[in-house]
Image (cartoon, rainbow, N blue to C red):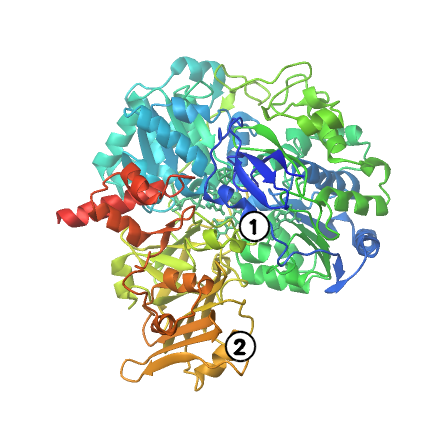
Amino acid sequence: MAHEVKTTCPYCGVGCGVIARVGDDGAVSVKGDPEHPANFGRLCSKGSALAETLDLDGRLLHPEIGGRRTSWDEALDLVAEKFSQSIAEHGPDSVAFYVSGQLLTEDYYLANKLMKGFIGSANIDTNSRLCMSSSVAGHRRAFGSDTVPGTYEDLELADLVILTGSNMAWCHPVLYQRLASAKANRPDMKVVVIDPRRTMTAEIADVHLAIAPDSDTALFNGLLAHLSESGAIDLDYVSAHTQGFAEALQAASALDIPALSEATGLAPKQLRDFFRLFETTEKVVTCYSQGVNQSSAGTDKVNAILNCHLATGRIGRPGMGPFSLTGQPNAMGGREVGGLANMLAAHLDIDKLVDRDLVRRFWGAPSIAAKQGLKAVDMFRAVADGRIKALWIMATNPVVSMPDADAVEAAIKACPFVVVSDMQRQTDTARHAHVALPSLGWGEKDGTVTNSERRISRQRAFLPAPGEARADWWQLAEVARRMGFAEAFSHSSQSEIFAEHAALSGFENDGRRDFDISAHAEIEPADYNGLAPFQWPQPKGTAPQVKRFFAKGGFYHPDGRARFIAVQSPQARRANEAFPLTLNTGRVRDHWHTMTRTGKSARLSSHLAEPFVEIHPRDAQKAGVSVADLVMLESPHGTAIVRALVTERQAEGNLFVPMHWNDQFASKARIDALVPPVTDPVSGQPASKNVAVRAKRFAAKAYGFAVSAEKPEQFEAAYWAIAKADGGWRMELAFTDTHADWIDWCRQAFSISPDIDPIGYTDRTSGELRLAFFDGDRLLAALFLSPRPVAVARNWAVSQLGVSHANLSKRFAMAAGRPGADKPDPGATVCSCFSVGVNQITTAIREGCHSVEAVGEKTSAGTNCGSCRSEIRGIINACLAAAAE
Ligand SMILES: Nc1nc2c(c(=O)[nH]1)N[C@H]1C(S)=C(S)[C@@H](COP(=O)(O)OP(=O)(O)OC[C@H]3O[C@@H](n4cnc5c(=O)[nH]c(N)nc54)[C@H](O)[C@@H]3O)O[C@H]1N2
Ligand SMILES: Nc1nc2c(c(=O)[nH]1)N[C@H]1C(S)=C(S)[C@@H](COP(=O)(O)OP(=O)(O)OC[C@H]3O[C@@H](n4cnc5c(=O)[nH]c(N)nc54)[C@H](O)[C@@H]3O)O[C@H]1N2
Ligand code: SF4
Ligand SMILES: [Mo]
């Protein structure tokens, strides 16, 4: 029977409410939940496409040992036995868990409880180490607790919103849309974007400061010094609620304006204008994300920002405060349960005996880890050198996402016992598992997540468990029981685990800890099922509330005062003579991390269908790279081959490559293979955004583009990248050898039977070759080959997989790679909701549509989820600027 279920989006930390509808025929559709306080009904492109990612293609549906199907009992017995054996022979620190901010709080809570309380080691770390750990460390240094003081509404109430190291338009799209509409309603509101490259986020900005990589500390130190000189310090707040201002100010005053200009690459006037804007605007929110966290000075960057807000007392009041944007759907929940190797559950401190004792008593645990465990980069080092002998990886794909990824892969391959819990059978990491455990995915699993504004929401199941897949918490509890900890892991539902977690948050708390949701300590399953989104804290006996922290002090250091941190501004310049370019890495709009889910959606895959490098025209010229060439990138750690996207949005000397592509989708694009394992000394977070590399043209003899109804599996190519398309697959190719028989190559790659002959032609002078294979009127595959990057109307070619080719001239048009005059090529997809291409948008602009709204009216682009609105704005600006020249 058709039914609707309220749940939460499994992608970014905005944490949007989703209503999933399962139709009579079992078909799922999703829409935004108008009542959810994070999104009020909006969804971005990824959220809107959730239903397209739920198929069972490639799912791991049964437990496997050594690649062979087995029973749950056998798999769980083996995991428990191997872990227990390693602990007995080599001690508790010889085993480790590497988990994820994509686990639900209930899963995460049990993983942490098992490792820290019962195994007795703190060797549990998480991909949050690569994501939020500098923010956590910065918060704890300044506030004495890992607290995000504000709420989303503050972005709408502010008069100045600073976005630094955040590509919010693409990474927190619904929050960005809330900001964009607040600014449209109140045009006096100012937005400043601080990012070395001009991202789509900058399209609504009044000011874009293209700072030199890693010069944020210098910039915010300069700001603090300016605030002091201009008398903008809130002396009452500073003296009543803080410590260490003088030292911080002294460190901040080290650079004068010319030195700051040199350090940040910004003109003195840009610096002064920015400083003055901050000085004269009381309601300021500073949002920051990975451009701040993922740095060898990430924690210092965080504290440089917090210093400015503490000094002006602009914290915890409506429209004011620093705001760390969390990445993953449950990055915040993971911090609450103490999932990091240097934390303890419920925001307690692993370095404090009293805190350890409190948790041990609450859990009734035999022993509790007495010291911090290994942080992600060190953990994989310990795997590599044999100190860790049994490793359980859950809901993360480190062979793609860890720095020095090739070394991480080698370590995993060499590890005596590796367990991987995932939804997908074939990931770059899962392929090396000794034991693979099938986990439930979004729509099947049930529990809670916490978003960036401390709001806890339910993810609810609306689909049956596929095959034998089981929840991650169940897997952990079963292994714990088999290791002899049955009593402490007797939970029969996620509701019981949540209640225990809530009870621990209130246990001997008395207001001493920020995280307290003990109002839910005795929650019954029925109430848990119906639980409405609420923000923490919510102590016992209180109703849900909107809470901001620290407006009147009340910090969590023992004296109740915040700490200013004196931070220096040394430049982390890594580029050098041999590796002269600075590689920056991050995200694109329509893919999520290692693409195990978004890679299933043709719509999402059409926005950017291939791994690429953004490169400035002068750097391209120096490297001998022309538009659409392939580029070989090299660092001392690894290499990658990606497409050149030559653009002035990128600063000279800097490159940007997305983190998403991996061995399942491209021949050589795992960009983390190039990233050195350099980490922040305080947080242990890797510096994923400042990597010294060199670039050169990848010399290919032939370039290809192909579409195919079946997924190509067996083929030879020096470069390939594959993406899901409507009705099949699309592929970019390059060859360093020319194959004698391309027809044969196609037959192998696209599994085409020998009785089917292609239609096509070869042009001997230009060296172009076209081949198309039909089964009756249905296109099976087509290959377009050229000595130069192939010029073919790609989206049109892809669309031919779904149309009838009954008439012969249509088949020849296919082979020619050119649409007929009646069917113009839409160009690369901009709006994935309505599949509107860039050519359609520029046509609309030429016809007089000069606003995002007008383009939307004409083409529908940008009128559903709105994620592409800043790109449309960018295209309009570029077209109008070109027309004016
Ligand atoms: N579409 C999409 N959205 C996502 C995700 C996804 O995979 N896809 N992942 C989610 C996750 S887990 C996370 S953590 C967030 C990340 O969200 P963001 O942090 O917004 O995303 P990134 O692209 O990693 O990096 C942000 C920006 O930092 C800039 N930057 C690089 N170096 C510096 C620097 O030295 N200083 C400054 N100020 N800026 C710099 C980069 O140019 C980049 O534009 O996104 C979340 N949302
Ligand atoms: N160079 C570079 N590297 C980076 C970054 C960067 O900006 N640049 N960003 C870093 C950041 S911020 C992050 S958060 C990481 C993300 O990196 P990862 O965590 O490695 O990326 P995901 O693709 O999200 O991996 C999640 C895995 O869990 C599986 N999965 C999904 N749901 C479930 C579930 O419910 N249970 C289980 N057991 N499995 C599930 C998915 O199929 C997938 O294999 O990458 C980091 N690495
Ligand atoms: S902004 Fe998009 S990806 Fe993030 S939670 Fe909302 S719908 Fe999901
Ligand atoms: Mo992240």
Of residues 686 and 559, the one nearer the viewer is 686
Task: Answer whether residue 165 is visible to the viewer in this image.
Answer: no
Question: Compared to 486, does 828 lie above or below?
Answer: below
Location of residue 542 (image quadrant): top right
Q: Position of residue 325 (x, y in %)?
A: 48, 35
**On the rendered structure, is 475 left or right of 708?**
right
Residue 30 occupies which quadrant of the picture?
Answer: top right
State the image coordinates of residue 475 (x, y, percent, origin top left): 76, 46
- For mark 2, give the secondary structure: loop
Q: Which residue was labeled with disc 1?
A: 53
- The label on residue 485 is none
Give the label, 2 or 1, closer to the camera.
Answer: 2
The residue at the point 84 percent across, 41 percent down is 485
Whether residue 196 can be seen here? yes
Residue 733's x, y, as percent?
43, 70
Instruction: Respond yes or no on whether mark 2 lies under 8 Å from ligand 2.
Output: no
Near mark 1 (Cα within 10 A), the count class, few <14, some 14-19 or many ≥20, is some
Q: Amino acid at mark 1?
A: Thr
In-front residue for pair 758/129: 758
Please tell me which residue is depicted at 66% across the width and 40% down the height of the picture: 462
**Badge 2 is on which residue?**
752
In the image, residue 384 sits, relative to residue 482, either above or below, namely below
Q: Position of residue 412 (x, y in %)?
A: 65, 60
Drawn side of residue 3 relative to residue 155, left or right: right
- Considering only vertical position in the picture, is 324 above or below 472? above
| Residue type (three-letter) at the residue carrying disc 2 | Ile
Q: Is residue 880 left or right of residue 818?
A: left
The residue at the far bottom in this view is 740
User: From the image, which quarter does the N terminus lie in?
Assistant: top right
